[in-house]
Image (cartoon, helix red, strand yellow):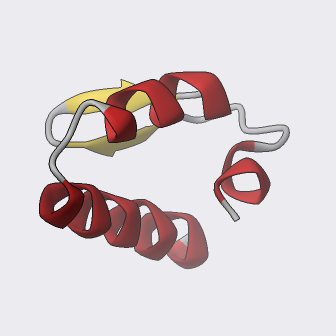
Amino acid sequence: MLRRIYNGRTVPIIVDGQPFLTYKEARRYLLSLTPEAREKVYAAMRDIAASE
């Protein structure tokens, strides 16, 4: 699902004050978080992408 969110994106998704334009950037950031924080940030990314 994360790849779908970032596939062909030209406008970054901003979460936790950080812009993410590519799947690799988002993945790297998510993997650096604790599991609880990861779920919260991933949900925020999905919500932002769905609202665009």
Name the residue: 43% across, 75% down: 47
- The front one of 32 and 25 is 32
Name the residue: 81% across, 43% down: 7
**Quarter of the rendering occupied by the C terminus:** bottom right
Residue reaching furthest to the right: 8
- The front one of 31 and 16 is 31
Residue 29 appears anywhere in the view:
yes
**Is residue 44 shown left or right of residue 52?**
left
**Quarter of the rendering occupied by the N terminus:** bottom right
Instruction: Answer with the quarter of the image where residue 17 lies.
Output: top left
From what the image shows, is residue 8 above or below residue 18?
A: below
Q: Position of residue 29 (x, y in %)?
A: 34, 30
**Is residue 42 shown left or right of residue 49?**
left
From what the image shows, is residue 39 above or below residue 19?
A: below
**Is residue 14 shown left or right of residue 25?**
left
Across the whole image, how many numbered discs are drawn on residues? 0
Q: Position of residue 46 (x, y in %)?
A: 50, 70
From what the image shows, is residue 38 above or below residue 20?
A: below
Q: Position of residue 27 (x, y in %)?
A: 51, 35
Q: Position of residue 5 (x, y in %)?
A: 68, 56
- The front one of 30 and 11 is 30
Residue 22 appears anywhere in the view:
no
